[in-house]
Image (tube, grey):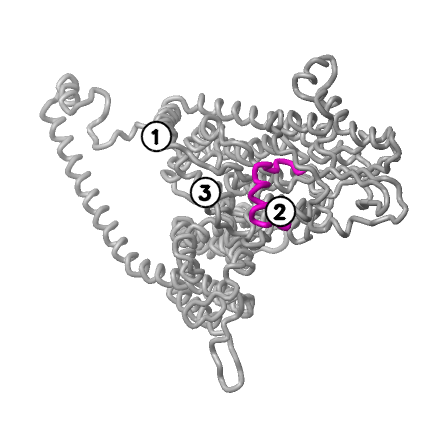
Amino acid sequence: SEMTLGSMLETLIIGPLKFIFEIIFQTIYELVQDPGLCIIALSLAMNFLVLPLYRRADAVQEEARDKEAALAPGISHIKKTFSGNERLMMLQTYYRQNQYSPLHAFRGSVSLLLEIPFFMAAYQFLSNLELLKGASFGPITDLSVPDQLLVIGGLTLNLLPILMTLINFASAALYLKGFPLKTKIRTYGIAVVFLVLLYNSPSGLVFYWTLNNVFSLLKNLVLKVIAPLREARKAKIAENTENAEDAETEETAENYENTGTSESNEELRRSSGSAEEPLTRKNPLRKPAAPDGTFFTLSAAFLTVLIGAFIPSVYISASPQEYVDLTNYFHPLWYNLSALLLAAGFFLLWFTVFYRLAAPKGRIIFERILAVCAVLCTVNYMFFGTKLGVVSSSLRYEGGLTFSWKEHLLNAAVAAAVIVIVLLLVKKMKKAAKYLLAIGMASLLLMAVINTRTTAASIKELQNQPPTEEAQITLSRTGKNVVVFFLDRAMGEYIPCFLKEKPEFAELFDGFTWYENTISFGGYTNIGAPALMGGYEYTPVEMNRRDTEKMMDKHNESIKMLPVLFLNNGFDVTVCDAPYANYKWIPDLSIFDEYPAIRKYITKGTFGSKESKQAAVRGNLRNFFAFSVMKTLPTVLQIGFYDNGSYLTAGGQFGNATQICYSRSTSRGMDRSFLEPFDVLLNLDKLTKFEEQGKDQYLFFYNDSPHEPMLLSEPDYQPAL
């Protein structure tokens, strides 16, 4: 499977908004544990967040309407007087003379154009939110289904959509007072469309949109009260300013007449504090700071490349095959592309929308904030949290995410220094700052491309491997059966605990030998495994004596040692999941090609549920971007954003793909990386057949369920959500 053009556009445009919805909702939920209250908090947070955006959009719409009204008489005259091409040419000339384009008509619909993606994001998020299932709030018994609160006779109606529409009408009536009829018809028509679209939607979603309409109504009420007061205040200020300027002009003229000479006039200037500035309250010759769109775009592009391209590519290219499931194939580069689209949506699309709608002073502030973020994010990623241990394929740190108070203090001090330096650089040497951003972005992009090529090459090798057959283990009822179970990272010192807790294990494992005084030669597969599989000739010391041969070749030799010995002594041989064969995360079974009689299989993933596999893919499509954001945050924010490895995923949507551990004995969800090999162990009977008169059998069976620890429910230690 792969991402389609439609899903890419959705990720770019809707994905960032949906991500913000989720982060806000889950943060509130972890505090209050009530979905209804979370919806209220989400509505308030989003409305206050976008309030400046909508205020500016309203101003743009008002400017567009005023412009259209001013041009209307001229346009009407041209349409009455001319026709055909002549009318078209006259209209174009008239528009050009008045600096107007027909495309400016779209400015009158800015609020609607903004509302559509926000509505789509809310619809996608709240319509499929697991936390709402069965959750009640006030008279609403289930936020995941229509409310059905209004019963008239035998007819059941959904009250919330009707209430939402009435509030929408009231808000529109207040806002549209004095507007043209066509604008009113369009606005009321949109309210009716929302009623039709949301009538049978989950009550949680309609509740959210109703709250938005309440907020809009209150906003319009406040503006209607404030607007006249503001206009009166502006008029008074203008009048006072005009009077002050007239008085100042008279005073200046009088001083000039009294002094009479240029020398005296120069002395007057010096006494006023400046020999160069004229006698005005502000120097009209001093050029005010102006917005710099190029600088803003460079900062946004830098953040897009850093968070969306470079950081994900680093982690994927380190072990590309770790992110591949042969039974549910999904190329890991799609994860990188998803992160890039989300980052581009955030920084290049939505930040640009906010920037373009902002006033000039607001744009300047935006530019400086984004430049600081670009440098600060780079510093946080490069110098903090670099020794947190192994990151799993589900983007969780095996040892958790922790920082000492010293690291927090150092990070805060560095952040303060970065902010001061960047602001000074932007103020004094903006051109140099632009060059630095461009060079940094190009460097990150180049490294991301190199990492992407590494990933593509590794996956291509995997794709070139011939597909393996469905595993089949054969055992003999009359001959010898030599069975080796290799459990990666299993803890031998736990065995006495197992036997004490469940004595029946001793009987079940009758015939096996437990060598209790053993220890691995290393903590990693390529160091510790060869000696276990091949004997003392494959300890690190002995392997290093053969310093003219590749480590990979010696590792492969150790894997083949026992299978080939038993094959040469008349046994049928079966090997399942040869560990790290050919130094590949997904074992390259071609190492046995010279021994066609050896049966070789990959069992991992054979019995995993399709739902779990798809959930894992969805989780990584979202969380690679979230992981990159987390890595660039200040350390004090990283722990909360990491959220025990869930990255504030609302309601554990990927609970059957990732387990979130809150302590050594409490957790939520199940971990796919454990379940896939564990399911193979549970289904060994389905893989095994018995021969009455078969040959002697040798089985090497590798399984890495202990490699990815997961909490199991007591007392029988079973997986549970």
Q: Position of residue 496 (x, y in %)?
A: 57, 41
Q: Who comes first in sequence, dot 2 or dot 3?
A: 3
The residue shown at (55%, 61%) is 127
Q: Amino acid at mark 2?
A: Arg
Q: Position of residue 76 (x, y in %)?
A: 51, 58
Residue 495 shown in magenta = yes
Residue occupied by mark 2: 672
Q: Quadrant of the C terminus?
A: bottom right
Tell me where residue 337 sits by quadrant.
top right
Residue 641's disc is: 3
Q: Amino acid at mark 3?
A: Phe
The residue shown at (38%, 39%) is 360
Residue 585 shown in magenta = no
Residue placed furthest toward the bottom:
153
The magenta segment is 487-504
Residue placed furthest toward the left:
258
**In the figure, is residue 644 to the left or right of 564?**
left
Q: Is residue 212 above or below residue 610?
A: below
Q: Amino acid at mark 1?
A: Leu
**In the figure, is residue 219 to the left or right of 484?**
left
For numbered disc 3, what is the local secondary structure?
A: helix
Q: Is residue 267 above or below residue 423?
A: above
Q: CA distance from mark 2 to mark 1?
A: 37 Å
Report if residue 412 is visible in the image.
yes
**In the figure, is residue 381 to the left or right of 477?**
left
Tell me where residue 703 sits by quadrant.
top right
